[in-house]
Image (tube, coloured by chain):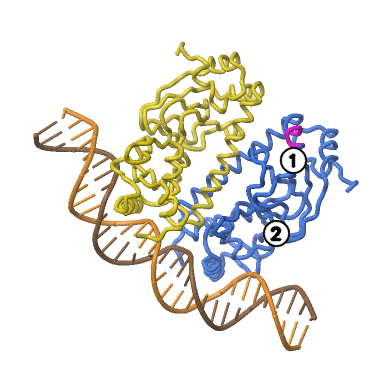
Chain colours: A yellow, B blue, C orange, D brown
DNA sequence: GACGGAATTTGCCGCTGCGCAAACAAGATC
DNA sequence: GATCTTGTTTGCGCAGCGGCAAATTCCGTC
């Protein structure tokens, strides 16, 4: 707890262009926190007491509907902010954030947000840019849901995941955290059964290799063809 | 062109808390513009030379996909900003904005954006709040597309429209601009045929009244039941 | 008032993909 | 190593809804 220093956050795009002494001040006001796999970082509808920076691990952001459906909004990678309810003009968290693996985060009390935004223009500029690109992601998502078939959406989701957190292996590009068929279904608006059928079919064609909570994309290029609807079903 | 004054924008939430003299300065730098029905305010991928405030009329924001699909992102009502690409960290417009009826807008050159944001903290705060709520709308949309059936989505869309631009008539609540079955289909990710069938069925049950590019909701409460999936199909 | 174009309605067919159910596999636990 | 839990696979049936096509109605225009 006493050993936090600016090297943790220097170089992250959110803190780009901020002086070293300011970075120290910023980090000095954070507390670091471990979140065990499958535990929440924050929860939907809760008072947004803190905002967070993910230092290590992967976090799944999920919205629950009143009727029991779960929709995965996005995955957070190291270096990204989360729980920034105040930047959206909210006082409660809009979704659940669940650690997909053991994670390390920095947490700041929300009351510091206005001061950060005022004192560090590049911080607020970078944050709002991030919000802007999330808005565009969300629109892309809406368009995909409106115009694409399930196989295209699942293909797009896998491509996004390997782009964001892909790790080269000798077999192909591995999604670098445990992800179940159910998780993929919640990202794409379908059911785990349909995802399972698709992955099985793609595995037969040598496009992917997958196992329990593990997916490796073997042929990204052919997957892209499916994502864009340019390949007939096999 | 010479007769613009602050009364045009005073009282709008985006300009809340800004002094009268500043409002004059802001309006003084705008030019007002008429957009005829079905003409574009700005177009997707174009250089974002200006940002706009809708003074009168209704504007449909539509994204076109490479394969020829059109998805309606939102409708803009008087008092709302649009084309604020710079607030999202973009230099081109992300979508087409089409006048649903004859419109009047104020336009500012985009290069004024940074100065506005710096000089009028409440302007930038209000804008980012608006972006935040659009992000939440987009997420809501994703959730609806993922978990709801077509009839629920169309019901939700109609409810949103009457909430935003509903006008009381003796028959019910009228959506106060021309809107076709095709338009509703593009808002909900379905086809005009399905929308037509749904509206016909609902008309038989007395839920709505509709005609050529006109929809009136007669029984909002029962429509809400459908939107929430609590009513069996008739 | 007749004509032409655009929006809407409606029938029919077929496919995508979901629901249900049951078997199966892979880790986790003791 | 035996058992339990959790994730995955797969078959079968069917319903929601999209595609196609044709008829119809509405409205602007000449």
Q: Residue at x 77, y 50 (%)?
A: B105
Is B115 covered by the magenta stretch?
Answer: yes
Q: Residue at x 38, y 60 (%)?
A: A233
| Residue A198 in view of the camera | yes
Identify the residue under disc 2: B100
Q: Give the range drawn in magenta.
A: B112-116
Identify the residue under disc 1: B110
Tag on residue A228?
A: none
User: Which residue reaches farthest front?
Assistant: A170
Q: Is residue B233 above or below residue D24?
A: above
Q: How many marks?
A: 2
Which chain does the residue under circle 1 lie in? B
Q: Which residue is drawn at 41% across and 54% down?
A: A151
Q: In this view, does A130 lie above or below B205?
A: above
Q: Where is residue A197 in the image (x, y as percent from the top left)?
A: 32, 53
Is A201 covered by the magenta stretch?
Answer: no
| Residue B164 in view of the camera | no
Which chain does the residue under circle 2 lie in? B
Q: Cα distance, mark 1 to mark 2? A: 24 Å
- A192 or A39: nearer the eye? A192
- B93 or A226: nearer the eye? A226
Residues packed near mark 2 inside 10 Å, few (<14), some (14 to 19) or many (20 plus): many
Q: Is mark 1 on a helix, strand or loop?
A: helix
Q: Where is residue A28 in the image (x, y as percent from the top left)?
A: 53, 14
**Which mark is in front, 1 or 2?**
1
Which quadrant of the view contains residue B28? top right
Residues packed near mark 1 inside 10 Å, few (<14), some (14 to 19) or many (20 plus): some
Q: Position of residue A18 (x, y in %)?
A: 61, 21
Q: Would residue A12 be found to the left or right of residue C1 on screen?
A: left
């Amino acid at each position: 707890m006493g050993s936090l220093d600016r090297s943790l956050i220097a170089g992250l795009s959110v803190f780009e262009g901020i002086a070293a002494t300011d970075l120290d001040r910023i980090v000095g006001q954070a507390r670091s926190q471990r979140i065990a796999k499958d535990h929440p970082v924050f929860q939907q509808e809760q008072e947004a007491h803190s905002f967070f920076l993910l230092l290590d691990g992967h976090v799944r952001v999920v919205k629950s509907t009143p009727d029991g459906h779960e929709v995965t909004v996005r995955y957070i990678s190291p270096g990204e902010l989360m729980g920034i309810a105040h930047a959206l003009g909210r006082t409660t968290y809009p979704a659940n954030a669940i650690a997909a693996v053991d994670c390390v985060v920095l947490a700041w009390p929300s009351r510091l947000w206005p001061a950060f935004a005022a004192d560090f223009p590049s911080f607020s500029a970078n944050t709002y840019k991030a919000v802007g690109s999330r808005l565009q992601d969300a629109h892309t998502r809406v368009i995909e849901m409106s115009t694409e078939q399930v196989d295209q959406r699942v293909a797009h989701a896998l491509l996004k995941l390997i782009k964001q957190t892909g790790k080269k292996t000798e077999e192909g590009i591995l999604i670098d955290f445990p992800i179940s068929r159910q998780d993929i279904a919640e990202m794409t608006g379908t059911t785990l059964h349909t995802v399972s059928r698709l992955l099985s079919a793609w595995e037969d064609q040598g496009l992917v290799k997958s196992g329990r909570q593990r997916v490796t994309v073997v042929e990204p290029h052919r997957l892209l063809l499916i994502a864009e609807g340019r390949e007939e079903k096999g």
